[in-house]
Image: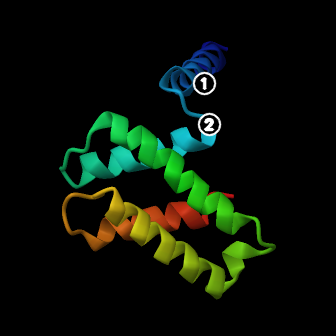
């Protein structure tokens, strides 16, 4: 019973956190991915830019996810990868050259919807 109450309180806090940040639930998921990659690969990236970049990542994925079976079509996934590489490069993310960072972002994007 205490575990359920704690879980409920954690969920409420998480829901409030993205609202306070000015992003929606899906954008918060990408924000969390981007920030966790920065910690994992030991680089810094400005907080405000992370928030804006998470919104842009979601836009790119939403654009590709409008197609039926988009995550099963190699042509759409290739476009998604290309668009994400361009977007991340434009935003200077990551500020280090790490293919693993791109790979993890692609995996999360493909599993998103």
- Residue nearest the observer in this picture, 86 or 69: 86
- Which residue appears farthest toward the front when viewing the image? 90
In the rendered image, which quarter is residue 7 located in? top right
- 93 above or below 5? below
Alpha carbon distance from label 1 to label 2: 7 Å
- Which residue appears farthest toward the right when viewing the image? 68
Is residue 80 shown left or right of residue 43? right
Label drawn at residue 45: none
Residue, disc 2 = 25
* Crowd band around label 2 with a 10 angstrom C-alpha radius: few (<14), some (14–19), many (20+): some
- Residue nearest the observer in this picture, 10 or 38: 38
Residue at horizontal 35 percent and vertical 35 percent from the top: 48
Label drawn at residue 15: 1
Quadrant where the image shows the N terminus:
top right
Residue at horizontal 66 percent and vertical 19 percent from the top: 4
Residue at horizontal 52 percent and vertical 46 percent from the top: 55
Residue at horizontal 26 percent and vertical 51 percent from the top: 40
In the rendered image, which quarter is residue 47 located in? top left
Q: Position of residue 89 (x, y in %)?
A: 33, 65
Q: Earlier in the sequence, mark 1 or mark 2?
A: 1
Mark 1 and 2 residues: CB-CB less than 8 Å, in contact? yes
User: Quick check: can you spot residue 65?
Assistant: yes
């Amino acid at each position: 019973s205490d575990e359920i109450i704690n879980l409920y309180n954690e969920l409420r806090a998480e829901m409030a956190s993205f609202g306070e940040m000015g992003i929606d639930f899906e954008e918060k998921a990408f924000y969390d991915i981007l920030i966790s990659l920065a910690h994992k690969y030991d680089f810094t990236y400005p907080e405000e830019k992370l928030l804006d970049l998470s919104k842009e990542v979601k836009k790119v994925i939403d654009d590709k996810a409008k197609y039926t079976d988009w995550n099963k079509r190699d042509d759409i996934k290739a476009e998604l990868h290309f668009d994400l590489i361009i977007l991340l490069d434009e935003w200077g993310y990551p500020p280090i050259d790490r293919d693993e960072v791109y790979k993890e972002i692609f995996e999360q994007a493909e599993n998103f919807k």
